[in-house]
Image (cartoon, helix red, strand yellow):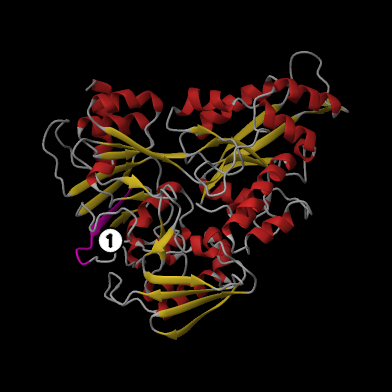
Amino acid sequence: MKNSTRAAVAALAVATGLPIAACAGDDAESDVLRYGLSSAPSCADPAQSSTNQTVNVSRQVVDSLVDQNRDTGELTPWLAERFAASPDGRSFTFTLRDDVTFSDGTPLTSDVVKKNFDALTSDESTSTRTLQASGFLLGYERTDTPDERTAIVRFAEPNVQFLQAAATTQLGILAPSTVAASFDDRCTASTVIGSGPYTYSGWEQDRSATLTRRDDYRWTPDTGLADHARYRTVEFSVVPESGVRAGSVTSGQLDASADPQPQDRSAIEASGAALTSRPNPGLPYVFQSNVSRGVLADAAVRRAVTTALDRKELVDTVLGDSFKPATSVLASTTPGYRADPAIRLDRAESARLLDAAGWRSSGEGTRSKDGKKLSFDVIYSPEFYGNKPVLELVQRQLASVGIDLTITALSNDDFLSRRKAGDSDAVYYNVTRADPDILRSRLGFEGTNYSRRGFDPQIDPLLTRQAGVADRAERLRLVDTLQTRLIEAGYAIPVVELSQVAAVASGFGGIGFDASGVLRLQYPDTDS
């Protein structure tokens, strides 16, 4: 190990409290997993998990009513041993297992389910980071509890996407003591009590999280997971520098790490470590255009940006072969995804569109129209290491057709605040969800509507309709049409797909990513 890397690893040990271990090749404590995160979890509460690294930690302590098979997308029992939707898609009946307990010994009952969903639709939840969880429950009326094992969740309008939402981390079921706490208090790990295979046993904000296995866990979902988690203790530590994370895996300081960067992967594999990955479903990384202001109010500019991007170059240059160029407003692992031919590199078309719209070029440099420069700004959170270099390369690509792009990095909280306020020309972000309803919740007029657009009669009725169609084939036909129309409108301009990637040292198995691209520590050892 080079001296600079050795020094960095030593600094990591001091900063995070990791023990200084022997270099690779020495025996590892197989019942302890030391996992390096690329950014800090923002909150211990699964319902408030707004970043991938946060979800990867919080998923280990919370279970959901149903799970989703990562190969087929099929929903399967978990906390609910049976579940069914009404023909009109407005009510969902869950029959709960009778052997589930939370880590404080409290049994799972239908009243606990009710309290969880009531809290997420309360006035308090709308002013916290529960935006995604609350969005899953849009139109929620109540949960009926005819007996301790039966919960009937009712909505004012058809809401067939809710069944898949019930498989997400954000709608995981927490103990009554957690639900009774304020959402601010729920960000403290000591208040978060779940029924998952692990419990929080330590939390230092922005530094580390420690989990301890529940040996009485007996309700593993039947989605290819092992009956029990392999590791008795999991120590998550925040290690922002990719080179330090990689050096820590190859030297034995860490047993696994998130987000290995392309330049580090050959050294990781040479050490005997393996890479495991899965593309995230849902909304790929997009520019969501604010059509209420600036040059992106011009649909021709939005279409010109779409055809100016060399997405393959972005992946090959910055991200590596674990990632894919975006080819639709849905990521390729999302049910209903279809690649759209309009997502292509065609800079001659970009120039034609801009010329026709009156954006003139004087040769080199930025185009202009009526004395106004063809320039827009984009805000982003650097939570994913690839965001900055991807956007810098996008900046150069757009410049080649006369479009000037200004890039602004923000802390995650500032990014969320400015995105909600519409305080930018565009936002660059992704959302992970294994259901096409992500289009309604993020791109719809009645969703978060970061595009600041008005009602679109070609798009919004279809977004509403697909959420209520119980027939899968009919629903996916609507989703197919929606992808084309959303791309034509340019409300969201696809860039690249996000993948979850982990480097895993030899001898440390059981690590993989589920249907939603979320870390799970119960896969069979051969899976990693």
From the top left corner, tell me how far across and down residue 396 is, in percent. Answer: 62, 22
SS of the residue at dot 1? loop
Residue 201 vs 106, above or below: the answer is above
Q: Residue at x 63, y 69 (%)?
A: 158
189 in relation to 155, above or below: above
Look at the image and tell me whether residue 17 can be seen. no
Relative to 507, 58 lies left or right: right
Is residue 210 located in the magenta-colored stretch of the structure? Answer: yes
Kindly identify the residue that appears in the image at 45 percent across and 55 percent down: 49
Residue 526 visible in rendering: yes
Pick the residue in front: 398 or 85: 85
- Which quadrant of the rendered structure holds the N terminus? top left
Residue assigned mark 1: 197
Relative height, residue 44 to residue 158 (above, below): above
In this rendering, position of residue 219 left or right of residue 318: left
Q: Residue at x 59, y 41 (%)?
A: 338
Q: Position of residue 51 (x, y in %)?
A: 47, 49
**Amino acid type for the residue under numbered disc 1:** Pro
Magenta region, residue range: 208-216
Quarter-of-image position of residue 299: top right
Q: Which of the 4 image quarters holds residue 102? A: bottom left
